[in-house]
Each structure stands twice: as C-alpha cells, then as structure tokens.
Amino acid sequence: MEEIKPQVHIPPPPPPEKKVYVNGVDVSVLVTSEVHFTRDGKQITTSLKDFSKGILLDRFPDLNSFLSEWSETDRKQILEEELMELGIPVDHLVDAVDRELDLFDIICHVAFDRPPLTRKERADQVRKKDYFAKYGEKARQVLQVLLDKYADEGVQNLESIDVLRVNPLTEIGSPIEIIKEFGGKSIYLQAVRELEQELYKIGA
C-alpha cells in the first residue's frame, strides 16, 4: 500500500513592505517604529509623531499662528500639500494618530498637545447649535448632508462644488437648483465657508 504522506502547508512569503517616499527620501521606517533619521538624511532616534511635530513647529511656531492660517486658507488641501512637501507623510501620520480625526485636530494634537475631537464630534456639536435655522428648508438639507460628509470623509468634500453632483445631494436637486436655493454661487460658497468656521470654532 502506498504510504500517504501528510501534506505540509507552507504559507506564502509576506509581501514586501511598501516604501513611503517624501521628497525622494524613504520614510517608511518612520511609519511603524522609532528609527535613526532626520530630514536631511542624518541619523537620529525619532518617531513619526515626533518627526512631524518638529516640522509643524517650524512651520507654525505657536497655536495662534496655525489657527489663523487654517481659518484664512480657502482650501485646506493646500495646507496638506504643503506639509507633504515639507516632509510629513500626512496619510501615514493620520494612521498613526487616528483616522477619525480631521487634519486640523491631528496638527493641534501632535504639534500643540491639545486633546482632539473626532470629525463626528465636531459635526454633532454644530448640529446642537441649530446653526442652519437662518436658511430655507432645501438649503438646510444641503448643509446637513455636507455636515454628514464632513463627519464621514473630511473637509475636502465641503470645499469642492463637485460634491453637489453625488448622492444624496442629487436627490435634493441639480447643482444649479441647489445653488439657486442659496441665492447664487457666491452665497452658496460663503455658506460653506461659514459652515467650516463653525466646525473649527469647536474646541479651538
């Protein structure tokens, strides 16, 4: 009788670790552990949060300077892109801290040791203030949806008018119809900007 040999399961080798490059420098080691590294390539012991804190404090010497610039920047994506150019792997920093946080709270927490609020907490506190009362019914529906999208996905959705082309906003009306509910494009954009200001008043 032929001997039946037990089958041995050999697991496949783990996939190679994904490299993360910022300005041509491999910073993937910063994502998971403390390493010897500096921005100019010299080696020291640091972590992703400490590494990022140093860059953030060079860029924003105090909390007030950051709050002022955040408030005055029309598109928060611009600041995110600048931080990446300075050497911060922003997406990995968010992973290291908490993906439920807005970049605003990530910066305040990492650079200035402030207790953060999640996007959902910020959105809920705006709702409690009955901020939408001054708008008509359909305009209020639009702002409520934008607030939900902020809580789920972040501020970038608020800043793009293309958000009016996706569900559930398309169920309220076309982009032109929605903008008319606010009295025109400039008034709609101002309403969105005011919504952002309300979001970032909380805990600031």
Image: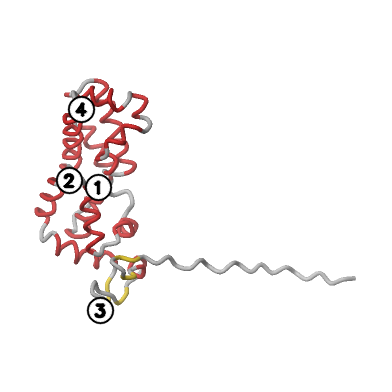
Helix, strand or loop at label 4? It is: helix
- Circle 1 sits on which residue? 117
Kind of element beneath mark 2 = loop
Which one is nearer the viewer's eye here, 192 or 52?
192
Q: Residue furthest top?
A: 137
Instruction: Find the residue positioned furthest to the bottom.
Output: 43
Q: Position of residue 95 (x, y in %)?
A: 34, 57
Residue located 32% across and 38% down the image = 149
Amino acid type indicated by mark 3: Lys
Percent coordinates x, y for residue 159 in the rendering: 24, 40
Element at label 3: loop
Which residue position holds label 2? 203
- Mark 2 or 3, nearer chain start: 3
- Amino acid at dot 1: Leu
Name which residue type carries label 4: Phe
| CA distance separating discs 3 and 4 | 52 Å
Mark nearer the viewer, 3 or 4? 3
Which residue bears the numbered disc 3? 42
Going from the N terminus, do you reach mark 3 or mark 1 first? 3
Check the picture and name the quadrant holding the N terminus: bottom right
Q: At label 2, which amino acid type do we have? A: Gly
Secondary structure at badge 1 equals loop
Q: Nearer the viewer, residue 202 or 15?
A: 15
Q: Residues within 10 Å of mark 3 (few under 14, many from 20)?
A: few
Q: Picture coordinates of residue 160 (x, y %)?
A: 27, 39
Q: CA distance from mark 2 to mark 3?
A: 38 Å
Give coordinates of residue 29: x percent, y percent: 36, 70
Are the residues at dot 1 and dot 2 in contact (C-beta closer than 8 Å)?
A: yes
The mark lying in front, picked from 3 and 1, is 3
Residue underneath mark 4: 132
